[in-house]
Amino acid sequence: MIKVNDLIKSYSIDGQKFWAVDNVSLAIGKGDMTSIVGHSGSGKTTLLSLIGGLTKPDSGSIVVDKENLLAMSDNELSTFRNRKISFIYQFSSLIPTLTVLENVILPTVFGKQQPDGVAYARELLAIVGLENKMKVYPSQLSGGQQRRVAIARAFINAPELVLADEPTGDLDEETEEEMIGLFSSMNKNKGVTFLVVTHSTELAKRLGRQFKMHNGRIEEII
């Protein structure tokens, strides 16, 4: 599903160059649940952005579902992401002028349609415990509730790959358990591949394969 070889991404700050991703190679199979742990600034989020085609590397190769991301135009990348990949960001990034239900349905405007997108959105919101909040606006929700809306939205286009950046970072323990259960269900029943960036070693242990990043380099935790 994902094959990354010799990936390098560097930045210059005040004339000094540093490597956010330093010669990283990584292979993740279809249907795998994989986590990457590491401190802030270790390169986890940058690597996730590279794999999702949101950032261009200095060098190396990125293949997702047998497609070479670096050979695609911006339009081709956008279409590919909408068909194959969903992102769960560290911040919920909801549209403030849309209701909760409208926020979840929004990706279907640009991508593949569910047989009944509204019905499926309602089902997803029920799964994340927000069946009674469908008509309210993001400003009327807590931070944890907004995160749950974003998680529901991530599944509306039936993605094959979910890239998640701290998906349970501001959730209480009970809701975190529900989200892990949702991920496991989507993985088992729909074959969704997950790559999750997290600070939580406990969460990482429950997601199968584990990698650790430090100063832009990666190693598998056995």
Image (cartoon, helix red, strand yellow):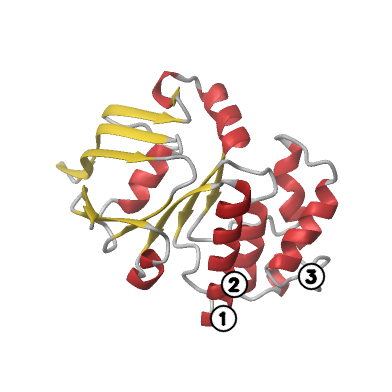
Q: Is residue 220 above or below residue 130?
A: above
Which circle marks residue 131 in the picture?
3
- Tag 3, which secondary structure? loop
Residue occupying image coordinates x 29% and y 40%: 26
Which three-letter amino acid code belongs to the residue tagged 3?
Answer: Glu
For marks 3 and 1 on the same chain, the one whose residue lies earlier in the sequence: 3
- Where is residue 10 drawn, in percent x and y? 23, 39
Of 31 and 64, which appears nearest the observer? 31
Relative to 140, say whether 82 is above or below. above
Q: In the image, which is nearer the foreground, mark 3 or mark 1? A: 1
Find out whether the residues at labels 3 and 1 contact each other: C-beta distance under 8 Å. Answer: no
Which residue is disc 1 drawn over?
A: 174
- Are dots 1 and 2 in contact, CB under 8 Å? yes
Mark toward the start of the polypeptide (2 vs 3): 3
Residue located 40% across and 38% down the image: 51
Residue name at image x 41 percent, y 66 percent: 206
Relative height, residue 8 to residue 91 (above, below): above
Q: Residue furthest bottom?
A: 173
Residue picked out by circle 2: 178
| Residue 99 in sight | no
